[in-house]
Amino acid sequence: MGWKVELYEKNPNRHVTCGGLVSNDTLLDFPFLEEYVINRIDGAIISAGEESITVERRGVAWVLNRDEMFRGMIESAVSSGVEVKEEVWTPEKGSGRVLVGADGALSSVRSLVTSENPTYILGYQGIARWKEDDHLVRVDFGEWGPNFFGWVIPLGDGAAHVGVGVPLERSGLAHQLLLKYANYLGVEVKKEEGRLIPVSRPLKMVARGNTLLIGDAAVHVKASTGGGLAYGLKGAATAAEVINRFLGDEGKLEEYNTVHRKHFLPKLKLHWFIHRFYNEADLPNLLKQLQEGGLVEELSKKGSMDDPSFFLSLRFLPLIFRTFGPFVRTLPELL
Ligand SMILES: Cc1cc2nc3c(=O)[nH]c(=O)nc-3n(C[C@H](O)[C@H](O)[C@H](O)COP(=O)(O)OP(=O)(O)OC[C@H]3O[C@@H](n4cnc5c(N)ncnc54)[C@H](O)[C@@H]3O)c2cc1C
Protein backbone atom coordinates (compact mmCIF):
# COMPACT_ATOMS: atom_id res chain seq x y z
CA MET A 1 0.00 0.00 0.00
CA GLY A 2 3.08 2.21 -0.22
CA TRP A 3 3.66 3.00 3.46
CA LYS A 4 7.10 2.70 5.01
CA VAL A 5 7.31 -0.51 7.08
CA GLU A 6 10.00 -1.84 9.41
CA LEU A 7 9.69 -5.55 10.16
CA TYR A 8 11.48 -6.89 13.21
CA GLU A 9 12.01 -10.64 12.90
CA LYS A 10 14.48 -12.07 15.35
CA ASN A 11 14.95 -15.23 13.31
CA PRO A 12 14.16 -14.91 9.57
CA ASN A 13 15.59 -18.40 8.91
CA ARG A 14 13.55 -20.15 11.56
CA HIS A 15 11.81 -23.47 11.02
CA VAL A 16 8.06 -23.18 11.77
CA THR A 17 6.51 -26.01 13.79
CA CYS A 18 3.09 -26.30 12.12
CA GLY A 19 0.90 -28.87 10.37
CA GLY A 20 0.37 -26.44 7.48
CA LEU A 21 -3.28 -27.45 6.94
CA VAL A 22 -5.62 -24.79 5.53
CA SER A 23 -9.14 -25.00 4.17
CA ASN A 24 -9.91 -24.54 0.49
CA ASP A 25 -11.80 -21.36 1.47
CA THR A 26 -8.57 -19.93 2.89
CA LEU A 27 -6.73 -20.76 -0.32
CA LEU A 28 -9.45 -19.01 -2.34
CA ASP A 29 -9.28 -15.96 -0.06
CA PHE A 30 -5.45 -15.83 -0.21
CA PRO A 31 -4.38 -17.20 -3.62
CA PHE A 32 -0.69 -16.41 -2.93
CA LEU A 33 -0.74 -19.53 -0.71
CA GLU A 34 -1.02 -21.77 -3.81
CA GLU A 35 2.73 -21.40 -4.26
CA TYR A 36 3.31 -23.32 -1.02
CA VAL A 37 0.82 -26.18 -1.50
CA ILE A 38 2.39 -29.64 -1.15
CA ASN A 39 -0.69 -31.87 -0.80
CA ARG A 40 -4.43 -31.94 -1.51
CA ILE A 41 -6.77 -33.14 1.24
CA ASP A 42 -10.08 -34.83 0.40
CA GLY A 43 -11.51 -35.34 3.88
CA ALA A 44 -10.97 -36.51 7.43
CA ILE A 45 -11.28 -39.65 9.48
CA ILE A 46 -12.52 -38.71 12.96
CA SER A 47 -12.41 -41.35 15.67
CA ALA A 48 -13.15 -41.73 19.37
CA GLY A 49 -12.99 -45.09 21.13
CA GLU A 50 -14.41 -47.76 18.84
CA GLU A 51 -16.36 -45.30 16.71
CA SER A 52 -15.16 -43.47 13.64
CA ILE A 53 -16.63 -41.42 10.80
CA THR A 54 -15.13 -40.37 7.47
CA VAL A 55 -16.09 -36.98 6.11
CA GLU A 56 -15.14 -36.61 2.44
CA ARG A 57 -15.01 -33.76 -0.09
CA ARG A 58 -12.37 -33.55 -2.80
CA GLY A 59 -9.98 -30.63 -2.30
CA VAL A 60 -11.63 -29.53 0.97
CA ALA A 61 -8.22 -28.54 2.35
CA TRP A 62 -4.58 -28.19 1.40
CA VAL A 63 -1.26 -28.76 3.12
CA LEU A 64 1.29 -25.97 2.89
CA ASN A 65 5.04 -26.05 3.28
CA ARG A 66 5.01 -23.71 6.25
CA ASP A 67 8.78 -23.02 6.20
CA GLU A 68 8.61 -21.94 2.56
CA MET A 69 5.52 -19.84 3.28
CA PHE A 70 7.32 -18.05 6.13
CA ARG A 71 10.43 -17.35 4.06
CA GLY A 72 8.37 -16.48 0.96
CA MET A 73 6.33 -13.90 2.88
CA ILE A 74 9.49 -12.25 4.21
CA GLU A 75 10.98 -12.21 0.69
CA SER A 76 7.84 -10.66 -0.79
CA ALA A 77 7.81 -8.05 2.00
CA VAL A 78 11.44 -7.19 1.17
CA SER A 79 10.68 -6.92 -2.54
CA SER A 80 7.79 -4.55 -1.70
CA GLY A 81 10.24 -2.24 0.07
CA VAL A 82 9.84 -3.44 3.68
CA GLU A 83 12.97 -3.04 5.76
CA VAL A 84 13.64 -6.29 7.64
CA LYS A 85 15.64 -5.97 10.84
CA GLU A 86 17.02 -9.24 12.16
CA GLU A 87 16.58 -8.09 15.77
CA VAL A 88 14.40 -8.58 18.79
CA TRP A 89 11.80 -5.80 18.99
CA THR A 90 11.54 -4.17 22.42
CA PRO A 91 9.45 -1.11 23.37
CA GLU A 92 12.66 0.98 23.39
CA LYS A 93 12.89 0.46 19.60
CA GLY A 94 9.78 2.62 19.21
CA SER A 95 6.71 2.07 17.13
CA GLY A 96 6.36 4.65 14.36
CA ARG A 97 2.77 5.77 13.81
CA VAL A 98 1.40 2.24 14.10
CA LEU A 99 2.73 -0.85 15.86
CA VAL A 100 1.57 -4.32 14.75
CA GLY A 101 2.17 -7.16 17.19
CA ALA A 102 2.55 -10.25 14.98
CA ASP A 103 4.83 -11.83 17.55
CA GLY A 104 3.17 -15.17 18.05
CA ALA A 105 1.54 -17.12 20.89
CA LEU A 106 3.73 -15.65 23.63
CA SER A 107 3.42 -12.10 22.27
CA SER A 108 5.09 -9.39 24.33
CA VAL A 109 3.19 -6.69 22.40
CA ARG A 110 -0.14 -8.16 23.60
CA SER A 111 0.26 -6.57 27.04
CA LEU A 112 0.19 -3.11 25.37
CA VAL A 113 -3.35 -3.87 24.16
CA THR A 114 -5.03 -6.00 26.80
CA SER A 115 -4.56 -7.48 30.25
CA GLU A 116 -6.38 -10.64 29.12
CA ASN A 117 -4.11 -13.69 29.15
CA PRO A 118 -4.95 -16.59 26.83
CA THR A 119 -4.73 -20.23 27.85
CA TYR A 120 -2.40 -22.51 25.90
CA ILE A 121 -1.87 -26.06 24.86
CA LEU A 122 1.40 -27.56 23.68
CA GLY A 123 1.19 -28.68 20.05
CA TYR A 124 3.69 -31.52 19.84
CA GLN A 125 4.39 -33.26 16.54
CA GLY A 126 6.90 -35.16 14.46
CA ILE A 127 7.18 -36.83 11.07
CA ALA A 128 6.28 -40.44 10.29
CA ARG A 129 6.18 -42.62 7.19
CA TRP A 130 2.53 -42.80 6.13
CA LYS A 131 1.25 -45.74 4.11
CA GLU A 132 -2.49 -45.02 4.49
CA ASP A 133 -4.53 -42.77 2.18
CA ASP A 134 -2.42 -39.61 1.85
CA HIS A 135 -5.41 -37.43 0.95
CA LEU A 136 -7.22 -37.97 4.27
CA VAL A 137 -6.26 -36.31 7.55
CA ARG A 138 -6.96 -38.08 10.85
CA VAL A 139 -8.38 -36.62 14.05
CA ASP A 140 -8.26 -39.22 16.84
CA PHE A 141 -9.65 -38.48 20.29
CA GLY A 142 -8.10 -40.64 22.98
CA GLU A 143 -5.83 -40.82 26.02
CA TRP A 144 -2.87 -39.48 23.93
CA GLY A 145 -4.52 -36.06 23.59
CA PRO A 146 -5.97 -35.11 26.98
CA ASN A 147 -8.53 -32.28 26.40
CA PHE A 148 -7.49 -32.25 22.74
CA PHE A 149 -6.73 -34.95 20.15
CA GLY A 150 -4.09 -36.60 18.00
CA TRP A 151 -3.76 -35.66 14.32
CA VAL A 152 -2.23 -36.97 11.13
CA ILE A 153 -1.64 -34.55 8.26
CA PRO A 154 -0.23 -36.39 5.21
CA LEU A 155 2.41 -34.45 3.31
CA GLY A 156 1.80 -36.26 0.03
CA ASP A 157 5.26 -37.76 -0.27
CA GLY A 158 4.76 -40.91 1.80
CA ALA A 159 5.27 -38.99 5.05
CA ALA A 160 2.90 -37.27 7.49
CA HIS A 161 2.91 -34.87 10.39
CA VAL A 162 1.72 -36.84 13.42
CA GLY A 163 0.95 -34.81 16.52
CA VAL A 164 -0.88 -34.48 19.81
CA GLY A 165 -2.27 -31.54 21.75
CA VAL A 166 -1.18 -31.56 25.38
CA PRO A 167 -2.48 -29.36 28.25
CA LEU A 168 0.35 -27.19 29.59
CA GLU A 169 0.36 -28.82 33.03
CA ARG A 170 1.09 -32.16 31.33
CA SER A 171 3.61 -30.86 28.78
CA GLY A 172 6.37 -32.89 30.46
CA LEU A 173 4.53 -35.99 29.18
CA ALA A 174 4.37 -34.79 25.56
CA HIS A 175 6.90 -37.32 24.27
CA GLN A 176 5.13 -40.26 26.00
CA LEU A 177 1.72 -39.12 24.73
CA LEU A 178 2.99 -38.82 21.15
CA LEU A 179 4.54 -42.28 21.49
CA LYS A 180 1.19 -43.65 22.69
CA TYR A 181 -0.54 -42.12 19.67
CA ALA A 182 2.16 -43.42 17.31
CA ASN A 183 1.67 -46.91 18.74
CA TYR A 184 -2.07 -46.64 18.21
CA LEU A 185 -1.43 -45.70 14.56
CA GLY A 186 1.36 -48.26 14.17
CA VAL A 187 3.97 -45.72 13.02
CA GLU A 188 7.34 -44.49 14.22
CA VAL A 189 7.62 -40.73 14.74
CA LYS A 190 10.87 -38.85 14.20
CA LYS A 191 11.96 -35.20 14.49
CA GLU A 192 9.69 -34.40 17.45
CA GLU A 193 9.13 -30.72 18.23
CA GLY A 194 6.63 -28.61 20.15
CA ARG A 195 5.25 -25.09 20.21
CA LEU A 196 2.55 -23.37 22.21
CA ILE A 197 -0.86 -22.77 20.64
CA PRO A 198 -3.24 -20.25 22.23
CA VAL A 199 -6.29 -22.51 22.53
CA SER A 200 -8.35 -20.08 24.49
CA ARG A 201 -11.47 -18.07 25.00
CA PRO A 202 -10.92 -15.29 22.41
CA LEU A 203 -9.65 -11.83 23.34
CA LYS A 204 -12.20 -9.03 23.54
CA MET A 205 -9.73 -6.39 22.35
CA VAL A 206 -7.10 -6.62 19.63
CA ALA A 207 -6.23 -2.91 19.27
CA ARG A 208 -5.50 -0.05 21.62
CA GLY A 209 -3.95 3.35 20.93
CA ASN A 210 -1.56 2.88 17.99
CA THR A 211 -1.08 -0.88 18.56
CA LEU A 212 -2.83 -3.77 16.73
CA LEU A 213 -2.44 -7.52 17.24
CA ILE A 214 -2.61 -10.15 14.51
CA GLY A 215 -2.17 -13.94 14.28
CA ASP A 216 -1.46 -15.94 17.42
CA ALA A 217 -0.71 -12.68 19.26
CA ALA A 218 -4.39 -11.75 18.72
CA VAL A 219 -5.49 -15.33 19.57
CA HIS A 220 -7.01 -15.49 16.09
CA VAL A 221 -6.88 -19.26 16.44
CA LYS A 222 -9.65 -21.85 16.06
CA ALA A 223 -9.80 -23.38 19.54
CA SER A 224 -11.61 -26.44 18.11
CA THR A 225 -8.51 -27.51 16.14
CA GLY A 226 -5.64 -25.19 17.09
CA GLY A 227 -5.49 -23.93 13.50
CA GLY A 228 -4.28 -20.34 13.35
CA LEU A 229 -3.59 -19.71 9.67
CA ALA A 230 -7.14 -18.93 8.47
CA TYR A 231 -8.06 -16.29 11.04
CA GLY A 232 -4.44 -15.10 11.28
CA LEU A 233 -4.48 -14.24 7.57
CA LYS A 234 -7.98 -12.74 7.72
CA GLY A 235 -6.96 -10.60 10.71
CA ALA A 236 -3.77 -9.44 8.96
CA ALA A 237 -5.71 -8.45 5.82
CA THR A 238 -8.26 -6.53 7.93
CA ALA A 239 -5.52 -4.82 9.96
CA ALA A 240 -3.77 -3.74 6.73
CA GLU A 241 -6.97 -2.12 5.41
CA VAL A 242 -7.65 -0.35 8.72
CA ILE A 243 -4.05 0.94 8.92
CA ASN A 244 -4.17 2.12 5.31
CA ARG A 245 -7.32 4.16 6.01
CA PHE A 246 -5.84 5.50 9.26
CA LEU A 247 -2.59 6.64 7.63
CA GLY A 248 -4.58 8.20 4.80
CA ASP A 249 -6.63 10.14 7.41
CA GLU A 250 -9.77 8.27 6.41
CA GLY A 251 -10.38 6.13 9.48
CA LYS A 252 -9.44 5.17 13.02
CA LEU A 253 -7.37 2.20 14.23
CA GLU A 254 -10.22 1.43 16.66
CA GLU A 255 -12.15 0.10 13.60
CA TYR A 256 -10.03 -3.06 13.91
CA ASN A 257 -11.71 -3.81 17.26
CA THR A 258 -15.11 -3.24 15.68
CA VAL A 259 -14.43 -5.72 12.86
CA HIS A 260 -12.94 -8.18 15.36
CA ARG A 261 -16.03 -8.00 17.58
CA LYS A 262 -18.50 -8.21 14.72
CA HIS A 263 -16.92 -10.76 12.38
CA PHE A 264 -14.22 -12.68 14.28
CA LEU A 265 -15.45 -12.96 17.87
CA PRO A 266 -18.74 -14.82 17.21
CA LYS A 267 -16.96 -17.51 15.16
CA LEU A 268 -13.96 -17.79 17.47
CA LYS A 269 -16.35 -18.15 20.43
CA LEU A 270 -18.12 -20.95 18.61
CA HIS A 271 -14.77 -22.72 18.08
CA TRP A 272 -14.05 -22.27 21.80
CA PHE A 273 -17.51 -23.66 22.62
CA ILE A 274 -16.81 -26.71 20.42
CA HIS A 275 -13.45 -27.23 22.15
CA ARG A 276 -15.14 -27.13 25.57
CA PHE A 277 -18.04 -29.26 24.33
CA TYR A 278 -15.92 -32.13 23.03
CA ASN A 279 -14.12 -32.20 26.35
CA GLU A 280 -17.44 -32.74 28.12
CA ALA A 281 -19.35 -34.90 25.63
CA ASP A 282 -19.47 -38.67 25.21
CA LEU A 283 -17.65 -38.54 21.86
CA PRO A 284 -17.95 -42.19 20.77
CA ASN A 285 -21.70 -41.89 21.28
CA LEU A 286 -21.81 -38.58 19.43
CA LEU A 287 -19.96 -40.04 16.42
CA LYS A 288 -22.32 -43.03 16.45
CA GLN A 289 -25.34 -40.72 16.42
CA LEU A 290 -23.86 -38.63 13.58
CA GLN A 291 -23.44 -41.84 11.59
CA GLU A 292 -26.88 -43.23 12.39
CA GLY A 293 -28.64 -39.90 11.88
CA GLY A 294 -27.26 -39.60 8.32
CA LEU A 295 -25.42 -36.43 9.32
CA VAL A 296 -22.00 -37.52 8.06
CA GLU A 297 -23.22 -36.91 4.51
CA GLU A 298 -24.43 -33.46 5.54
CA LEU A 299 -21.03 -32.75 7.10
CA SER A 300 -19.27 -33.92 3.92
CA LYS A 301 -21.40 -31.60 1.78
CA LYS A 302 -21.70 -28.48 3.95
CA GLY A 303 -19.16 -28.72 6.78
CA SER A 304 -16.60 -25.92 7.03
CA MET A 305 -13.28 -26.16 8.85
CA ASP A 306 -13.30 -22.44 9.53
CA ASP A 307 -16.92 -21.54 10.14
CA PRO A 308 -18.67 -24.00 12.47
CA SER A 309 -22.01 -22.13 12.42
CA PHE A 310 -23.55 -24.94 10.32
CA PHE A 311 -23.56 -26.95 13.59
CA LEU A 312 -26.27 -24.56 14.73
CA SER A 313 -28.50 -25.63 11.84
CA LEU A 314 -31.78 -27.46 12.42
CA ARG A 315 -30.24 -30.81 11.43
CA PHE A 316 -27.48 -30.70 14.07
CA LEU A 317 -29.16 -28.90 16.96
CA PRO A 318 -31.33 -31.86 18.06
CA LEU A 319 -28.16 -33.98 18.34
CA ILE A 320 -26.41 -31.32 20.42
CA PHE A 321 -29.50 -30.89 22.64
CA ARG A 322 -29.63 -34.65 23.21
CA THR A 323 -26.26 -34.37 24.96
CA PHE A 324 -28.07 -32.09 27.40
CA GLY A 325 -25.55 -32.18 30.28
CA PRO A 326 -22.41 -31.24 28.27
CA PHE A 327 -24.44 -28.71 26.26
CA VAL A 328 -25.71 -26.86 29.34
CA ARG A 329 -22.30 -26.98 31.05
CA THR A 330 -20.62 -25.54 27.95
CA LEU A 331 -23.26 -22.95 27.08
CA PRO A 332 -21.71 -20.09 29.15
CA GLU A 333 -18.64 -20.26 26.87
CA LEU A 334 -20.78 -18.82 24.07
CA LEU A 335 -21.64 -15.70 26.08
C1 LIG B 1 2.34 -28.44 16.23
C2 LIG B 1 1.49 -27.37 15.59
C3 LIG B 1 0.74 -27.66 14.48
C4 LIG B 1 -0.05 -26.67 13.89
N1 LIG B 1 -0.77 -26.99 12.78
C5 LIG B 1 -1.53 -26.04 12.19
C6 LIG B 1 -2.25 -26.33 11.01
O1 LIG B 1 -2.19 -27.46 10.47
N2 LIG B 1 -3.03 -25.37 10.45
C7 LIG B 1 -3.11 -24.11 11.01
O2 LIG B 1 -3.86 -23.27 10.50
N3 LIG B 1 -2.41 -23.80 12.12
C8 LIG B 1 -1.62 -24.72 12.72
N4 LIG B 1 -0.89 -24.40 13.82
C9 LIG B 1 -0.95 -23.02 14.32
C10 LIG B 1 -0.11 -22.11 13.44
O3 LIG B 1 1.18 -22.66 13.28
C11 LIG B 1 0.00 -20.71 14.09
O4 LIG B 1 -1.32 -20.24 14.31
C12 LIG B 1 0.72 -19.74 13.18
O5 LIG B 1 1.99 -20.21 12.83
C13 LIG B 1 0.86 -18.41 13.91
O6 LIG B 1 1.53 -17.51 13.09
P1 LIG B 1 1.99 -16.12 13.69
O7 LIG B 1 2.73 -15.44 12.58
O8 LIG B 1 0.89 -15.43 14.36
O9 LIG B 1 3.02 -16.48 14.86
P2 LIG B 1 4.43 -17.20 14.75
O10 LIG B 1 4.47 -18.20 13.65
O11 LIG B 1 4.77 -17.65 16.14
O12 LIG B 1 5.42 -16.00 14.33
C14 LIG B 1 5.82 -15.01 15.22
C15 LIG B 1 7.15 -14.49 14.75
O13 LIG B 1 7.51 -13.38 15.55
C16 LIG B 1 8.90 -13.46 15.85
N5 LIG B 1 9.06 -12.72 17.09
C17 LIG B 1 8.42 -12.94 18.28
N6 LIG B 1 8.77 -12.00 19.19
C18 LIG B 1 9.64 -11.16 18.56
C19 LIG B 1 10.34 -9.97 18.97
N7 LIG B 1 10.17 -9.45 20.19
N8 LIG B 1 11.15 -9.38 18.07
C20 LIG B 1 11.32 -9.86 16.82
N9 LIG B 1 10.66 -10.98 16.37
C21 LIG B 1 9.85 -11.62 17.23
C22 LIG B 1 9.22 -14.94 15.93
O14 LIG B 1 10.58 -15.20 15.64
C23 LIG B 1 8.27 -15.52 14.88
O15 LIG B 1 8.89 -15.66 13.62
C24 LIG B 1 -0.09 -25.36 14.44
C25 LIG B 1 0.70 -25.06 15.55
C26 LIG B 1 1.49 -26.04 16.12
C27 LIG B 1 2.34 -25.69 17.29
Image (tube, grey):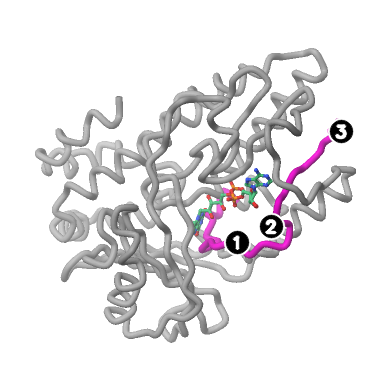
- Residue 328 lies in what quarter of the image? top left
The answer to whether residue 19 is magenta is yes
- Where residue 238 appears, as percent x and y from the top left, is 65, 31
Whether the residues at callouts 3 and 2 have beta carbons within 8 Å, the answer is no
Real-space CA distance between mark 2 and mark 1, rounded to the nearest whole angstrom: 8 Å
Q: Nearer the viewer, residue 208 or 141?
A: 208
Amino acid type, mark 1: Val
Q: In which quadrant will I find the C terminus?
A: top left
Residue shown at 17% from the left, 68% from the top: 49
Whether the residue carrying mark 2 lies under 8 Å from ligand 1 is answered with yes
Q: Nearer the viewer, residue 191 or 134?
A: 191
Whether the residues at callouts 2 and 1 have beta carbons within 8 Å, the answer is yes
Is 68 drawn above or below residue 73 in the view shown? below
Q: Which mark is residue 1?
A: none
The magenta segment is 1-26
Read off the residue under disc 2: 70
Q: In which quadrant will I find the N terminus?
A: top right
Which badge, 2 or 1, is on the more N-terminal residue?
1
Amino acid type, mark 2: Phe
Q: Which mark is residue 4?
A: 3
- Residue 72 lies in what quarter of the image? bottom right
Residue 224 vs residue 129: left or right? left
Q: Which mark is residue 16?
A: 1
Whether the residue carrying mark 3 lies under 8 Å from ligand 1 is answered with no
- Where residue 304 appears, as percent x and y from the top left, is 43, 48
Q: Residues within 10 Å of mark 3 (few under 14, many from 20)?
A: few
